[in-house]
Image (spheres, rainbow, N blue to C red):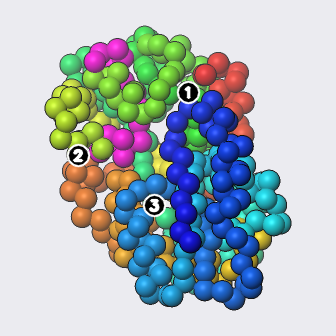
Amino acid sequence: MHIIVSERKSNVIRRAALLPLLALSLSLAIPVPSTAQDKVLNLYSARHYQTDEALYANFTRQTGIRINRIEAGDEPLLERLRSEGANSPADVLLLVDAARLWRAQIDGLFQPVRSRVLESRIPAHLRAKDDGKGSDWFAFSTRARVIVYNKETLRPEEVPTYESLANPGLKGKVCTRSGAHPYMLSLIGSISEHLGQPAAEEWARGVVANFARSPRGGDTDQIRAVATGECAVALTNTYYLVRLMRSTKPEDQAVVAKVGMVWPNQKGVGTHVNVSGGGVLKNAPHREAAIRFLEYLASDEAQVYLANGNNEWPVVKSATTGNAVLDSLGAFKADSLSIAAVGRAQINAARIIDRVNWR
């Protein structure tokens, strides 16, 4: 039986209200298998893209392993796994942010995996190491967090770095989403890793002082606010910008025409990169199938599906997506900071946003 419960990212209140119903419905979705040798894989995934249908079908065709999957938001899936404990039927968890992957790791949800395939194809800084026993989780696609600016009111040389967003000359011109969002926690955490916590806090305080309005909305809302002139500069993940660029709607094309993009910190550490990734769960009843699935996700074929599903980049160098709009953004220097360090740094990031009131 192939049952999907899909919960797209919405607001926190809606998710909280849905959790009891979600727990009940998901409890019926995947029965505990009778033996660990069944050719089946139980997948919990925060992904929800059309390309995933072909991704999973190809894995089954190649291996004979049938995938039962549950799709929901990151937090509902993490909450379910915590409540299921040792009785969880899930084998693999896929999440869409380093901060959330790290949260699953410190909650003890993953088990370390040693795989020559994964270790040879996925760069070391895109794997979470566990005391030499293997990696708890692996990144399978990447995106960058970039600066967008209003081309009529700001020049790109005025905002070449993340640090420049704290310059007093930008007072009343900066828009962001809530600092408590995982995308922002990951960025602020990476800045803390590079600059140290005191300097990162000083920077965050400067950004807050430059707000054009209180943080609200998602990344697409920030891009639109820049286009309308509500603010002059904002932060966004690259895929939100590419979605607008690929849209045929006149209103989206009007937004794209008014904004420019900067790859931040190109003369320094490089642009912050975040990931989607996953790992084998601690109580996975089908461990061998789970590792085969992760290895499949690192194949060139699967990498293309994973990346194209959300206008992201593959982590495997030999995989190419053929995404012309994404490619049109050009080449850039990416920050090579360990993605595991980015995840851990969210603790410092959360303290910083509380102290500077970036809410």
Q: Find residue 164 and report its image quarter.
A: top left
User: At x 36% / y 41%, what residue is drawn?
Assistant: 240
Of the pair 318 and 297, the residue shown nearer to us: 297
Q: Report the side of 245 relative to 6 (left or right).
A: left
Three-letter amino acid code at the position of disc 3: Ser
The numbered dot on residue 64 is none
User: In which quadrant will I find the C terminus?
Assistant: top right
Q: Residues within 10 Å of mark 3 (few under 14, many from 20)?
A: many
Disc 3 vs disc 2: which is toward the camera? 2
Q: Report the side of 297 relative to 223 (left or right).
A: right
Which residue lies under the disc numbered 1?
178
Give residue 146's position: percent from left, percent from top.
39, 39
Which residue lies under the disc numbered 3?
141
Q: Which residues are magenta?
A: 228-242
Disc 1 vs disc 2: which is toward the camera? 2
Which residue lies under the disc numbered 2?
246
Q: Is residue 239 magenta?
A: yes
The residue most toward the right is 86
